[in-house]
Image (cartoon, grey):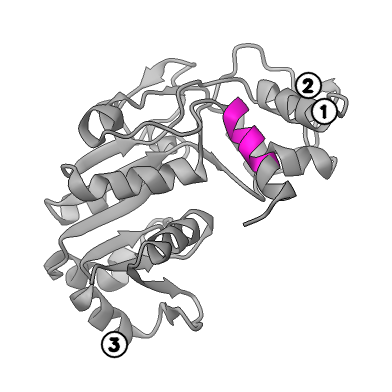
């Protein structure tokens, strides 16, 4: 039986685990604290044994400080593992700010605010010849989208003309990872087909909910958290052609419009 070991059971990884279990896979998670389906990260003996048994291994753990905790603790076992497939969920933040220009997998990395993420991305790429690195833009999906922010009164429209971002529905990430099981190693941007201003996404969510658009605010007047302000410090478009060519992957939600409609449907008829 195919056995996926996932280090880091966050939003995207948990969605992948559910999909694989539905398809008959054995899935073992690793998280800070153990539960019925996951090992504790600090249970070194059990984690190393799972690494040695798994046919597929994915890490979704972001770097902490200046290092990657998975590589620091388990890098030697991962490098020597007999797995048939290995992968790492990275971020398109490694490309930094391009002033709205397109980036692809050959674009330079490490020039942006996420230097630790870029270092981790490169370290995972050097770990094994069969590594797949998935560089992900803004992730949204059921329970974590502009639909919820608008409903909760937490959505903003920021007056930044020309500011553009890429994003991807969580289920399209899951589909891309699964498509790579039969594809070549390497780097893959998993983004939708339509980079767009965040304001357009908020407005579309408002329209779906039949609610008014929030007021247009200057960045300094929006009372954003430091993390949210940092989000607006970068501007780029992410190309997804490599995943389409080499993996046969196409996003089921090619733009935020289809993705938000799916999120709304999921909140009305949860699975």
Residue 154 visible to the viewer? no
Which quadrant holds residue 84? Answer: bottom left
In the foreground, 20 or 52? 20
Look at discs 3 and 2 and give the one toward the viewer: 3
Instruction: Evaluate if marks 3 and 2 touch, with contact meaning CB atoms under 8 Å apart.
Output: no
Q: Earlier in the sequence, mark 3 or mark 2?
A: 3
Circle 2 Cα neighbour tier, 10 Å, few/some/many (<14 / 14–19 / ≥20) = few
In the foreground, 31 or 38? 38
- The magenta region covers 257-264
Q: Secondary structure at mark 3?
A: helix
Q: Does the magenta-highlighted stretch encompass residue 258? A: yes
Q: Earlier in the sequence, mark 1 or mark 3?
A: 3
Q: Which residue is the site of mark 2?
A: 218
Q: Which residue is the site of mark 1?
A: 221
Q: Does the magenta-highlighted stretch encompass residue 134? A: no
Look at discs 1 and 3 and give the one toward the viewer: 3
- 3D distance between C-alphas at marks 3 and 2: 52 Å
Q: Secondary structure at mark 2?
A: loop
Q: Secondary structure at mark 1?
A: helix
Q: Residue at x 32, y 49 (%)?
A: 178
What predominant SS class does the magenta segment belong to? helix
Q: Residue at x 25, y 39 (%)?
A: 187
Left or right for 208, reference 255? right
Residue 1 tag number: none
In the foreground, 54 or 250? 250
- 3D distance between C-alphas at marks 1 and 3: 51 Å
């Amino acid at each position: 039986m195919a056995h996926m070991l996932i280090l880091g059971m966050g939003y995207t990884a948990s969605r992948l685990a559910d999909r694989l279990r539905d398809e008959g896979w054995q899935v073992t998670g690793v998280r800070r604290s153990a539960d019925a389906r996951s090992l504790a990260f600090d249970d070194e003996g059990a984690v190393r044994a799972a690494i040695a048994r798994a046919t597929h291994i994915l890490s979704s753990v972001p770097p902490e400080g200046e290092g990657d905790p998975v590589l620091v603790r388990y890098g030697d076992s991962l490098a020597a593992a007999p797995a048939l497939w290995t992968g790492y969920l990275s971020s398109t933040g490694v490309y930094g700010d391009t002033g709205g220009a397109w980036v692809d997998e050959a674009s330079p990395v490490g020039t942006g605010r996420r230097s630790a993420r870029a270092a981790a991305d490169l370290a995972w790429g050097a770990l094994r010849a069969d590594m797949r690195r998935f560089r992900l833009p803004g992730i949204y999906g059921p329970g974590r989208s502009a639909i919820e922010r608008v409903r909760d009164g937490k959505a903003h429209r920021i007056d930044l003309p020309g500011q553009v971002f890429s994003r991807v529905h969580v289920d399209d990430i899951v589909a891309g990872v699964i498509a790579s099981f039969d594809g070549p190693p390497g780097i893959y941007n998993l983004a939708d087909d339509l980079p767009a201003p965040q304001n357009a996404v908020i407005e579309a969510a408002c329209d779906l909910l039949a609610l008014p658009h929030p007021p247009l605010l200057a960045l300094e007047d929006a009372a954003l958290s430091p993390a949210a302000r940092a989000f607006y410090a970068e501007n780029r478009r992410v190309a997804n052609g490599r995943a389409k060519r080499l993996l046969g992957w196409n996003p089921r939600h090619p733009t935020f419009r289809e993705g938000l409609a799916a999120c709304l449907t999921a909140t009305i008829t949860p699975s």
